[in-house]
Image: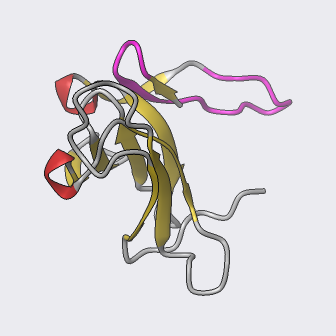
Amino acid sequence: MANTEKGLIVRVPILKGGDAGELQIVSEGPEVAGPDGIALDVHGDIYAVLVLQSKLVKINPVDGHVTDILTVEDGLDEPTSLAFGIGKGDRKSVFFTNFSVMEPHTGHGPAILKIDVGVPGLPLP
């Protein structure tokens, strides 16, 4: 889960019987400030768009290490709502929106963006 206000990426274990377990913090701090959407790849790595920083990042689920993939210099402008593609040729692509609502616009403006991250997304149930 992503908590935009607190800048947290957390894991919620599902216990036997379907109850939620205790929250486990995966990553927190200024490097993940403003997460507004997450998706996982087949290896469990977490991709997050950071609306407050205009970034797309990859987060290691074991140690919480954050790697920038795209930034405002790449045209991002308040990115939100990401998902891996599911169509032929798109399984290794992350799609997300450039919300671009606050002035001044720093990127491409409102848009749907796509980037190949080289790893397929985790199939959704």
Residue at x-position 67% and y-position 78%: 87
Percent across and percent down for residue 112 are 49, 56
Report the magenta residues as a range.
4-21
Where is the C terminus found, in terms of image quarters?
bottom right
User: Per the image, is 43 magenta?
Assistant: no
Residue located farthest toward the left when viewing the structure as drawn: 73
Residue located farthest toward the bottom when viewing the structure as drawn: 89
User: Per the image, is 6 magenta?
Assistant: yes
Name the image quarter holding residue 12. Answer: top right
Percent across and percent down for residue 13 are 62, 32
Percent across and percent down for residue 86 are 66, 71
Residue at x-position 44% and y-position 38%: 99
Name the image quarter holding residue 7. Answer: top left
Residue 16 visible to an observer of this rendering:
yes
**Scheme of image coloration:** secondary structure
Q: Is residue 44 left or right of residue 108?
A: right
Q: Main secondary structure of the magenta part?
A: loop
Residue at x-position 27% and y-position 44%: 55
Query: Looking at the image, is 75 positioned above or below residue 116?
Result: above
Q: Is residue 94 left or right of residue 29?
A: right
Q: Is residue 82 left or right of residue 76?
A: right
Name the image quarter holding residue 66. Answer: top left
